[in-house]
Image (cartoon, grey):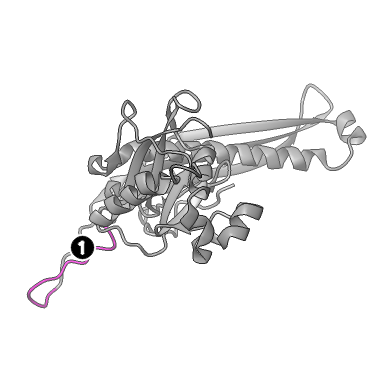
Amino acid sequence: MPRGGRRGRRPGRGEGSRGSGASFCQTRASADEGATDDDPPRVSQDAQVPAWIVLVHDQVGRAALNDAGQTLQVDQAKAWSVQVDDVDRRQAMGDMQSWMEERAAYRVADTADQFLAAQYVGVASANVLGTSGSPITPGLYNPSSAPADFYVKVVLPLKVLLGQQNVPDDGNRYLIVPPWARGLIEQTQAFVAFPGGGGGAGAVMQNGFFGKIGGFNLMESNNSVQVVPGGPGTGVWAIQAGHRDAITYAEQIVQTEALRAQATFADLVRGLHVYGAKVIRPEAMAVAYTLRPTGI
């Protein structure tokens, strides 16, 4: 599960937390010098000024640093517990407790990833394609009539939106899609045939390697937000793209402890995860409300 504390990390470099197959990218926040553990992490106000924008002056001089801050609320708390009965432990094959702890850690990380995925609502209004009521509708590949057009209708417009906001194409842009959208991308002939796009036809067809397209690191996640319930032909998803500097993320407590159960013969393992996130660069995100087409 994600590791890291409040201190010693500067905004501007992101790390992903795990979800169902992918990560929603974010930056970690550091605490103010001299702050106590009860104080919320603070993000430097300079973090609101994109790192890719440099102010150029007519005269040689020094620009005063704006040390104002914005508060990141660490207000998410999730706990888990596992009780392993002594009889079950003895009769089970293998280390049952370790397996249960690994599953609990995955679920905690997955829950945090869902929280990060929901931060898409903080996107700049100018960086939104379609609406939940009038979504983009990509088509399936038809060998006799039409190519797959998810790349043309969704990927390229998202790329243009980020480019217009001066978001750098420095290898840190991401595009996170649900499994059905990955299927549409893999129907794109250029993605399958171009050796540098993600491994070439062999890698895509044989082992599903998901690489890069349009300058985006491609990731698949079941935590992609579905904004309109339904399946093929009715369900609408918020397809998210952005730069990893768009969201900052902080963990305050990541704790696991073991103790002996009081009322029965068993060991009890429990954990606590406290975290928070904040969109600090809305212009570095883009969202496309996209309808899942019938047939996939």
For this orientation, the residue located farthest to the right is 91
Residue at disc 1, secondary structure: loop
Q: Is residue 26 left or right of residue 261?
A: left
The answer to which quarter of the image holds residue 268 is: top right
Q: Where does the image place residue 90, in percent across and percent down from the top left? A: 91, 35
Marker count (numbered): 1
* Rendering coords of residue 11 (x, y %): 37, 57
Q: Residue at x 36, y 48 (%)?
A: 152
Q: What x and y, as percent, mark residue 33?
A: 36, 57
Residue drawn at (47%, 41%) of the image: 275
Which span is picked out in magenta?
Answer: 49-61
Does the stretch in magenta take in 53?
yes
* Vertical comparison of 171 with 240: above or below: below
- Of all residues, the one furthest to the bottom in this rendering is 60
Where 129 sits versus 174, above or below?
above
Identify the main secondary structure in magenta.
loop
Which residue is pictured at 47% across the width and 38% down the height? Answer: 224
| Residue marked by disc 1 | 65
The amino acid pointed to by label 1 is: Leu
Please state the horizontal and vertical placement of residue 114, each as a whole percent of the image: 49, 36
Residue 162 visible in the current orientation: yes
- Residue found at the far front of this picture: 144
Q: Is residue 227 above or below residue 150?
A: above
